[in-house]
Every structure is written in structure tokens, then in C-alpha cells.
Amino acid sequence: MYRKELTYYFTSPIAYIVIGLYLLLISLFLWIIPGEWNIIDSGYAQTDGLFQLSPWLFLFLCPALTMRLFSEERQRGTWNVLLTKPVSLTKIVVAKFAAAWTLVLIALLPCITHIIAVYMIAEPYGNVDIAAFCGSFIGLMLISLAFVAIGTFCSSFSKNQIVCFIISVIGCAFFYYGFDLTSSLVSSAQAANIVQSLGGHTHFSSLARGVIDLSDVAYFIVATVFFIVSTIFSVQYKND
């Protein structure tokens, strides 16, 4: 099932378009477009722009990859055929989720070239905080894990892929920054901190500093498991 899903991505334009667009935008902002994220303009050997921009781009990249997971099966009438195969519903959901996340990891791998480039142009040569880069990169992997899980869950809502895409974008945006906005409406500072800690932005920001805190890692893993389990129940409910 995992191989089938992964093969489908690479036999259709969607994987190439989404990954290519992400890599193009990141490269343009880091090296070409003037601004705070431009490495040359900043005068520092750092790739902070990569980690500040990527979560916002993932808000669209992950839903674009996951919107078809269940909606297309129902639209094409192949979902009932899939259920007749000797594969459990849990394995089907996990396989589809894993295939979509693999695509995101493939999109992330070329980004390592940016740190290599910064390493080579730094003064003195190699004056780059590799540990901080690795911690931040792990943060991107974890937040994409949660975004793909949210997108997988939202894909089970409708046969219309556009509807699933829009719901996924909204869901990922709220997960990432919605709790921060909500906390600003809370009068109590202590309560505001609690609300803010429920959002993905707080935990990703901690990881983006290069500090690998197990509580931050656990947050994204728990969120991912929650949405995967929710997807299983959602799909099961629609089959009953």
C-alpha cells in the first residue's frame, strides 16, 4: 500500500510541482529576493530564513500532497475495492500518511545544500553552527509530520479535493499559529502562556533555536498520533 501510494505521486505531476515550487521559493527568498531572509543581505552565515519560511510554506505544501488521499479514492469509486483487499483500515491510513510524509522529507533533503553553501562562504571558512541547523531541521521534520497528519484527517471529510485542501490549510494554520492568536485574547498572563503552549509555533520555535527538548518532540508525536487515530475513526464512520 505504501509503495502504491508513493508510486502514484511520482507518476503524476503533483509531486514534482509541489516539491519544485517549495524548493524554488525557498531558494529565491534565501539568495535572490532582497529582504530579512536573504543570506547575502543579512551579512551573517546563517540559514534562519529557511526555518522561518518553511512552516508557512508547509501550510500549503502538506495539504496539497494529502488532499487526494481519501477524497480521490471516493471520487473514482475505488475506495470500496480497496477495502476488499486483505489489509486493515489502520494499515491503509498509516500507509497513505507515510507516503505523503515521505514526499515532504524528499522536499526537505535538497535544503541541506543551503547550509553547505553557507558553510563554504562563511568567514572564517566553516564558521556555522551545525548543531543549531540540525536541531532546526529536526523541528521542520516534526512539524511537517503533524501537518501531514492533519491533512490526512481532513482528506477524509469530502470527495472534493479542493474542499479538503482548504480545510487542511485552515486546520494546519490554526494548529501552528491559532493558539498564539487566541492567547492574545486571554487577560491572565498565566492562562495565556498555557494556551500558547498548546500551539505548534511555540514548540517549533524552541526546536528552531537548536535545542532538542523531549517535551517538544513528544508534542508533535502525540499530535500526529491523535490525528492519525482520528482519521481511522473518521473513515470507519463514513463506511458504516
Image (cartoon, rainbow, N blue to C red):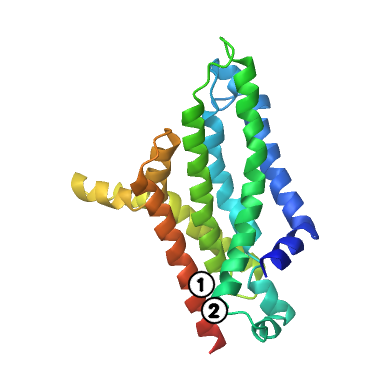
Give coordinates of residue 162: x percent, y percent.
65, 65
Above or below, 39 relative to 225:
above
Nearest the eye: 33 or 87: 87
Q: Residue furthest top?
A: 124
| Residue in the image at 58% along x and 62% along y | 166
Q: Quadrant of residue 15?
A: bottom right
Any mark on residue 19, and which? Answer: none
* Contact (Cβ within 8 Å) of mark 2 with mark 1: yes
| Residue in the image at 49% along x and 56% along y | 146
Q: Is residue 10 left or right of residue 157?
A: right
Give coordinates of residue 73: x percent, y percent.
69, 76
Above or below, 25 relative to 45:
below
Give coordinates of residue 221: x percent, y percent.
43, 56
Name the residue carrying label 1. Answer: 231
Q: Is residue 5 left or right of residue 224?
A: right
The residue type indicated by label 1 comes to Thr
Q: Residue furthest bottom?
A: 240
Helix, strand or loop at label 2? It is: helix
The residue type indicated by label 2 comes to Val
User: In this view of the protein, can residue 157 be seen by the observer?
Assistant: no
| Residue in the image at 38% along x and 39% along y | 206
Q: Quadrant of residue 9?
A: bottom right
Give coordinates of residue 28: x percent, y percent.
68, 31
| Residue in the image at 48% along x and 60% along y | 171
Q: Is residue 19 left or right of residue 177?
A: right
Q: Is residue 133 left or right of residue 12?
A: left
Name the residue carrying label 2. Answer: 235
Helix, strand or loop at label 1? It is: helix
Q: Residue furthest front?
A: 86
The quadrant in which the N terminus is found is: bottom right
User: In this view of the protein, can residue 104 be seen by the observer?
Assistant: yes
